Image (spheres, helix red, strand yellow):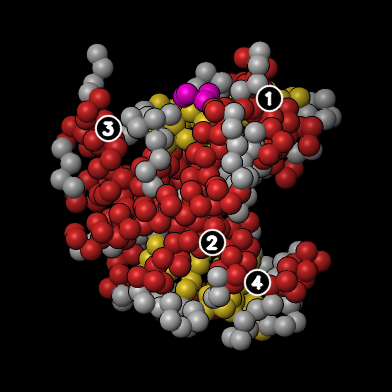
Amino acid sequence: MAVETRVSAYETAQRRFDAAADVIDLSDDTRRSLREVKRELTVHFPVRMDDGSVHVFTGWRVQHNISRGPAKGGIRYHPDVDLELVKALAMLMTWKCAAVGIPYGGSKGAVRVDPTKLSLTELEHLTRRYATEIALLIGPEKDIPAPDMGTSPQVMAWIMDTISMHAGHSVTASVTGKPVDVGGSEGRVDAPGRGATYLTLEALKYLHFEDQTPTVAIQGYGKVGRSAARLLSEAGLTIVAIGDSKGAVHNPKGLDLDALEEHRQVRGGVAGFKKADAIGNDQLLELPVTVLVPAAIENQINEQNASRIQARLITEGANAAISPGADPILHERGIFVVPDIIANAGGVIVSYFEWVQDLQAFFWEEEEINTKLHHVITRAFYEILHTSVNKHIDMRLAAYALAVQRVANATTVRGIYP
C-alpha cells in the first residue's frame, strides 16, 4: 500500500503538469521532455556503525530540469522514501523555482534511513559518505542541496565540508541552509514562515479582509508553524488555534503565544495548554476562521472534509496539504487558496540569496534579506493572481501554468543538443 502511495506522488506531479500544459497549449515535443526527470542517481553505500558493524544504505539524487539554471532541492532522511517520491519532489522544485522567478531548476535527494535511530557520529559518517557518492552531480554551478525532512543545518555543514575536502578549498556555495558560521544566511530559519506570512497578508488585502481583525488557525507547529504564528500575530492577526502531532488547542479570544511556547518546551507539544480548550486536529481544520494554515503533513484537506472547511483563505504551508480532489471543491465554494508551490517558497528564495552571497563573498543583513524576500514572493503572488483572473482558473493551476511556461520557454530557446 505504501508503495502505491509513493508512486501516486509522481503520478500526481505529472497530472498537475499535464493540466498546466493544457492551459498553455504546450507542444507535444516539449511536453514529453518536461514530463520526465533529466537524470536519476541511485547509490548504495556502506557506513560503519558505532558497534563496529557495517550497514549498507540506499540513497538518491534526482534532477528534473536544469534549463533555467543549476538544480536546487533538499535532501531528505526518512525510512519510507523511495525513488518515485524523490522524482515527484524534484519536479515540484522545478515548478516552485520557476513560479517565484529564481534562476534554478529542480532536484531532490534522499537516503532511506531513520535519522533518529543514529548516533551523531553515525549520522555524520552516513552524510559524508552519501555526499561523496553524489558528488559527481552536486556543486555550486550544478546542483545545490539544502535541508529537508530529517536533515538540518549541521548536516548541510558536513556536506559542504566533504565537498570542500575533495576540492581542496572551501566551497561554501555548494549547499544552502548552512549555519551562519560557515556561510549560511541571516533570515534562513524564519524564511518559510515569513514567506507564508507575507502572502497571507497580501491575500487578505486582495480579498478586502484587512479592515477586520482576521482570525487564524495553524495546523502543524514545527519551524514553519511557529514562525508563521509569531509573525502573523505581530502583523495584528489573532491566532485562535494551533495543533501539532499530539493534539490541538483553541481559544476564540486568541492564544497567548509566549505562554504556549513555554508550555510546548516543557511538555513537548501544545496539548494540555491550560489557557485554551483541547480539540482534535480535524476540528481545527473546520473552525470558522478567516485564515487556515495547514503546515503539517500532506492530504489534511481532502475530498472528505473540503465541504466543511469554513476558512475564507487557506495558505498551504505544507507540501500537498490539500489533496488534488479537494482543490475543485474549495474553488467552487469560493475559498481562496495560496498554494504550496509559492506559500512555502520562502525557504528556497532565501536559499537563493544564500547561494548568491556565498558566490560573491559578501553578506547582507537580515533586514535587507527580509525586504528582498518580500519583493520576490509578493511579485510572484501578483503574477500568479493575474494569470488566475485572466484565465479563470484557480491559483494552483495558475502557478503551475506560469511555471511550466517559463521552463518551456527556456527549454525551447536552448534547443536540443547536439
Residue 76 appears in the picture as rendered: no
Q: Which residues are magenta?
A: 138-142
Residue placed most toward the observer, 298 or 239: 239
Element carrying mark 2: loop
In the rendered structure, are the residues bearing label 1 and label 3 in contact, judged by CB atoms less than 8 Å apart? no
Which residue is found at the position 43% from the left and 52% from the top?
Answer: 375
Residue placed most toward the observer, 39 or 263: 263
Which residue is found at the position 66% from the left and 84% from the top?
Answer: 277
Q: Earlier in the sequence, mark 1 or mark 2?
A: 1
The residue under label 2 is 295
Q: Earlier in the sequence, mark 4 or mark 1?
A: 1
The residue under label 4 is 247
Mark carried by residue 161: 1
For label 3, the crowd category at 10 Å Cα-Cα, with few meaning under 14, some 14 to 19 and many 20 or more, is some
Q: Earlier in the sequence, mark 4 or mark 3?
A: 4
Tag 3: amino acid: Ala
Element carrying mark 1: helix
Q: Main secondary structure of the magenta part?
A: loop
Tag 1: amino acid: Asp
Q: Quadrant of residue 391?
A: bottom left
Residue placed most toward the observer, 269 or 188: 188
Q: Indicate which label's residue lies in the foreground, 4 or 3.
A: 3
Mark carried by residue 225: none
Residue 300: x and y in percent read 48, 65
Against 162, residue 33 (above or below) is below
Tag 2: amino acid: Ala
Tag 4: amino acid: Gly
Q: Indicate which label's residue lies in the foreground, 1 or 2.
A: 1
Marks 3 and 2 sit apart, C-alpha to C-alpha, by 32 Å
Which residue is found at the position 61% from the left and 61% from the top?
Answer: 227
Q: Earlier in the sequence, mark 2 or mark 4?
A: 4
